[in-house]
Image: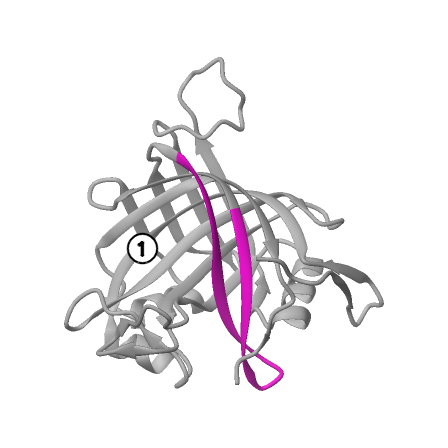
Amino acid sequence: MTFPDHTATLSTGRRVALPFRCQASLAGALFAADWQSLRRAVPDDLTPVRFGARTGGVVVAGVSYSKAGDFDPYDELAVVVPVARRTVGGVPLLDGGLGGYVLALPVTTEESRRMGREIWGYPKTVADVEIRRDAAASTESSTQVKASDTWHVELREDGERALTLSVRGAKPHTRETTLDSYTRHEGRLWRTPVEILGPVGVGVGRGKVSLDVGTGRLASRITRLGVGRPLGRFAGRIHARVQAGSAVD
């Protein structure tokens, strides 16, 4: 899939080349959550994907950008609800516009916050995000993704610990896909395709994931969604191209 290149200009006058090209390490998990609570949290034009009769899902992931266009490297924590635009009983149709609605996206730099909000409508805030990988001893490159790695993600808001996530790696396979992220931007539902390429390990969640929710605004929000047991996990290192996106008719 190809998209035209162009440039966006931020309110500061800084110009951003699109698609936005970046490289990042990431680790996260899919958690079961209360479907009715998710229904209230996402726009009416989207439907939370069902993983059971009363169960939807919430993805919590840490992303550490080593390259982010010509911006300084930064880290972020993403809280995303798997959704579809067209479903039957919460089950996406084959052409159902499957993607993720971004509920929260704390980042570590003000310039990233401004860029995300102004170009795509991402609900970015500035917070302390720490992403750490405990890698087994190896002669391989420090960037090599391994199933034996354990990733730790911690978010602190206003000096308080909001959450801590730990994810055990899984055997990586090179994956190439395009994922749609959904946001509210300029008063409209906005769809942004994100092209992803790189080694990513995917596995089940039981016994391999832990999430400890602390205090603060985001922690309270996650608690209200009824986030519970882990359903799956992922970790890897990717190249990504974030498109300009467009309003959903």
* Residue 190, position as x, y percentages in the image: 55, 76
Left or right of 208 in this view: 70: right
What is the number of callouts on the image?
Answer: 1
Does the magenta-highlighted stretch encompass residue 188?
yes
Does the magenta-highlighted stretch encompass residue 209?
no
Amino acid tagged 1: Leu
Residue found at x 40% / y 35%: 173
Residue 93 makes an appearance in the image: yes
**Quadrant of residue 228 in the image?**
bottom left
Judging from the image, what secondary structure is the residue with disc 1 in?
strand
Residue found at x 32% / y 73%: 48
Residue found at x 56% / y 43%: 24
Left or right of 57 in this view: 173: right
Q: Classify 216 as above or below 229.
A: below
* Residue 169, position as x, y percentages in the image: 35, 35
Left or right of 206 in this view: 196: right
